Amino acid sequence: MIDIQLRTAEPSEAESVLAFWEQAAEGTSISDDVDGVRRLLARDPGALILAVEDDVIVGSVIAGWDGWRASLYRLAVLPSHRRRGISKVLLNAAEERFAALGGRRADAMVLEANERAHHAWAAAGYEREERWRRWVKPFAG
């Protein structure tokens, strides 16, 4: 394990977070823009947890809580920092946040084709839910 600091993201870091996700995260989202990140932080200021080393973002997880469900998105670690326990530390922080807010279960969005992520989530104690599928509809805007 390396010496990292965990903290929540600030709205002024939206561009840095997006740049980090370009390097470390698989896939993109319709919300991957400065306004999207800032809206997330305005709605749920503690949701975006960052792992930082020497002022550089090396890991992230979105631990979104809507009062009903605990949802995990964007668990990502820089390729140069993988296999050092950063994702485990991020998930522990997210789970502690959910428990403190009254959450009883966390759901994770994981790309079907991301086999490396499947192994990481399984190692963290998460199980694939076969009964559900995600249905989406982008809004015109």
Image: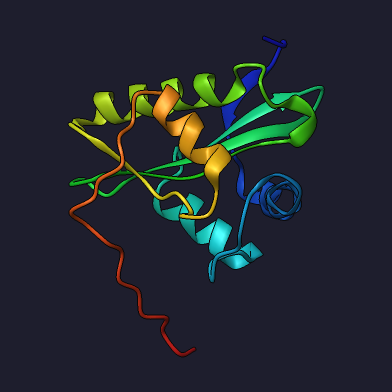
Residue 111 or 108: which is nearer the viewer? 111
Residue at (75% x, 35% y) in the render: 79
Specify how the rendered protein is coloured.
rainbow
Number of numbered discs present?
A: 0
Up/down of 65 relative to 14, above or below: above
Q: Position of residue 138 (x, y in %)?
A: 42, 81
Q: Position of residue 48 (x, y in %)?
A: 51, 41
Would residue 71 be seen by someone viewing this image from the given angle? yes
Q: Is residue 115 left or right of residue 130?
A: right
Residue 119 or 20: which is nearer the viewer? 119
Residue at (46% x, 43% y) in the render: 45
Residue at (62% x, 52% y) in the render: 26
Residue 12 or 109: which is nearer the viewer? 109
Would residue 75 be seen by someone viewing this image from the given angle? no
Q: Position of residue 25 (x, y in %)?
A: 64, 48
The quadrant of the rendering that contains the N terminus is top right
Q: Quadrant of residue 85?
A: top right
Q: Is residue 19 left or right of residue 118?
A: right
Q: Quadrant of residue 104?
A: top left
Q: Position of residue 12 (x, y in %)?
A: 69, 49
Q: Is residue 16 left or right of residue 28?
A: right
Residue at (21% x, 45% y) in the render: 67
Up/down of 11 relative to 125, above or below: below
Q: Quadrant of residue 38?
A: bottom right
